[in-house]
Image: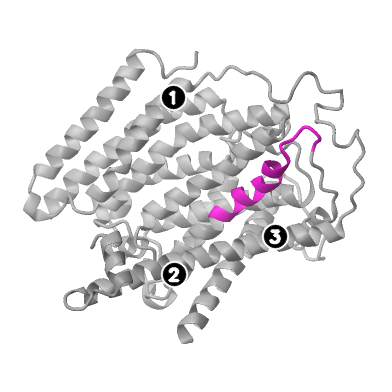
């Protein structure tokens, strides 16, 4: 697949005269598919706006101090709503960020790795990658961070 | 002009599916759960076995007073339901239902990537609601949602990557074109990991601890009423459609079937999606709620290793056969 930004520049400046014809077509397809996505997003936003507007016309609006009090099972709320709590899973957050960023790179690799020209190279690469993840996970497990403390 | 009309029709079709299918799943859930528990479920609205129950619910929701708590972060609080709902609408556009070129709302090149990225946005709605409500139950619900996100997102990504490897493309129609029947046993582990992780993303039982009505009332949605609450519910059921549709497309071969795939391919897609949706409902009736740490444990010590093993298996088989 051609680099979309490069193709886009070509299409926009109109310099796609010789070899750029195919590129322009690809770029048109590329932007077309996402412009449809954008249109659907507009439809969705309109739907929500119309729904909220219509329900505003339909529903009663009589706020009383009791009604807009924070709900705590009927008794008066204690302290602030934004209370301090202990976040027990912050280590998972680190693990997640590291691993998820790693796995994103799997997708571009996945589309080309089976090309016969690479032979077994990509397979070895894959095991190196999986090895890193597995060792990291094993280390975290050994350290005991995979159990709730 | 024809092109524009075509786009309008497609958007309309996706929008209609988005508004009706979640209601069908919701009504099925009412009835299936009821019968599994020896009840009848809704019987009055609409006359025939309470078919119009959810429409009646919708009318009721639209007329209810919309309450924003005095302590809440007003704008964020009001915006949250839309953020939770709209990503699922966008994902529906990219799910192919039939073999022909036109049997998808819009073919998006980046397929899996686009779908997973957009689905991830939906969770922001719950986080926004949990934080903006300024309510302790909501805050706990929001924190649990965040914890849950850390647990399921990685196995889901890895399982989806395995399919991309098998097909050699990330485009959803491309994956279906490459599908062979023996992918079913080949990718079964990935399929289960993906589906379980998806259930956790949707906060469906047994992974419904962020909403846990019996302990933290309804988590992030405690302070919501009327239409905004209804939109959160709609998001949950639209999410079921999206998850089941994606599992069907990625792992179960979508429009492929033992026979009739050319003309009636879309029927296979719908059938598989419906069966998976039934399983989602079934699981809700069957399993008790897990604790948040049990989900973390399940994810990091079981789902992630299984997904990694699936990737290794996919890689080896793919290189051997090519």
Binning the other alpha carbons within 10 Å of mark 3 as few (below 14), some (14 to 19) or many (20 upward) gives few
Compute the Cα span from label 2 to label 3: 27 Å
Tell me the quarter of the picture where residue B89 sits: bottom right
Q: Chain of mark 3?
A: A
Where is residue A2 drawn, in percent x and y?
Answer: 23, 63
Which circle marks residue A92 in the picture? 1
Where is residue B176 drawn, in percent x and y?
Answer: 33, 63
User: Which secondary structure lies at badge 2?
Assistant: loop
- Decide whether residue B86 is among the magenta residues: yes
Examine the rendering and report whether any part of residue B321 can be seen: yes
Of B296 and B1, the residue lying toward us: B1
Compute the Cα span from label 1 to label 2: 37 Å
Where is residue A84 drawn, in percent x and y?
Answer: 64, 18
Q: Chain of mark 2?
A: B
Nearer to us: label 1 or label 3:
3
Compute the Cα span from label 1 to label 3: 37 Å
Reading the image, the residue beneath label 2 is B104
Tell me the quarter of the picture where residue A71 sits: top right
Residue in view at x 7 percent, y 48 percent: A119
Binning the other alpha carbons within 10 Å of mark 1 as few (below 14), some (14 to 19) or many (20 upward) gives many
- Which residue ends up furthest to the bottom in the rendered image? B1
User: Which secondary structure lies at badge 3?
Assistant: helix
- Decide whether residue B72 is among the magenta residues: yes
Reading the image, the residue beneath label 3 is A49
Earlier sequence position, callout 1 versus callout 3 = 3
Of B133 and B315, the residue lying toward us: B133
In the shown orientation, is residue A117 left or right of residue A14?
left
Q: Answer yes or no: are tags 1 and 3 on the same subunit.
A: yes
Examine the rendering and report whether any part of residue B289 can be seen: no
In the shown orientation, is residue B269 left or right of residue B129?
left
Q: Are marks 2 and 3 in contact (CB under 8 Å)?
A: no
């Amino acid at each position: 697949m051609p680099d979309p930004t490069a193709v886009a520049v070509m299409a926009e400046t109109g310099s796609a005269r010789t070899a750029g014809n195919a590129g322009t077509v690809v770029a048109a397809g590329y932007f077309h598919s996402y412009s449809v996505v954008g249109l659907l997003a507009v439809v969705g936003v309109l739907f929500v706006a119309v729904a909220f507007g219509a329900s505003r016309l339909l529903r009663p609006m009589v706020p009383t101090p009791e009604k807009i009090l924070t709900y705590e099972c009927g008794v008066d709320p204690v302290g602030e709503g934004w209370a301090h709590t202990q976040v027990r899973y912050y280590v998972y957050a680190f693990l997640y960020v590291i691993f998820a960023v790693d796995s994103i790179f799997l997708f571009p690799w996945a589309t080309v790795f089976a090309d016969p020209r690479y032979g077994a190279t990509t397979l070895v690469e894959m095991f190196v990658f999986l090895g890193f993840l597995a060792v990291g996970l094993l280390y975290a497990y050994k350290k005991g961070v995979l159990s709730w403390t | 002009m024809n092109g524009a009309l075509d786009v309008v029709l497609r958007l309309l079709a996706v929008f209609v599916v988005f508004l009706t299918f979640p209601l069908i799943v919701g009504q099925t859930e009412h009835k299936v759960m009821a019968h599994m528990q020896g009840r009848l479920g809704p019987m009055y609205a609409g006359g025939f076995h309470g078919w119009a129950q959810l429409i009646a619910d919708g009318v009721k929701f639209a007329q209810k007073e919309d309450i924003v708590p005095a302590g809440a972060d007003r704008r964020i609080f009001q915006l949250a339901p839309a953020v939770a709902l709209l990503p699922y609408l966008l994902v529906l556009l990219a799910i192919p239902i039939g073999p022909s070129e036109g049997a998808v709302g819009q073919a998006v090149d980046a397929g899996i990537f686009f779908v997973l990225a957009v689905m991830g946005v939906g969770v922001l709605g719950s986080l926004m609601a949990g934080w903006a409500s300024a309510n302790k139950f909501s805050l706990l619900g929001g924190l649990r949602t965040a914890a849950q996100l850390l647990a399921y997102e990685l196995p889901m990504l890895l399982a989806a990557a395995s399919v991309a490897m098998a097909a050699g493309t990330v485009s959803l129609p491309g994956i279906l074109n490459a599908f062979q029947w023996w992918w079913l046993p080949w990718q079964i582990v990935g399929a289960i990991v993906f589906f379980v992780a998806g259930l956790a993303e949707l906060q469906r039982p047994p992974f419904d601890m962020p909403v846990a009505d019996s302990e933290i009332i309804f988590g992030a949605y405690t302070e919501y009423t009327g239409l905004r609450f209804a939109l959160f519910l709609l998001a949950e059921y639209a999410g079921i459609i999206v998850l089941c549709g994606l599992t069907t497309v990625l792992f179960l071969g979508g429009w492929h079937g033992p026979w009739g795939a050319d003309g009636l391919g879309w029927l296979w897609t719908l059938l598989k999606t419906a069966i998976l949706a039934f399983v989602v409902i079934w699981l809700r009736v069957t399993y008790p709620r897990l604790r948040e740490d049990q989900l973390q444990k399940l994810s990091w010590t079981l789902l992630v290793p299984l997904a990694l093993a699936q990737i290794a298996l996919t890689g080896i088989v793919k290189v051997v056969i090519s």
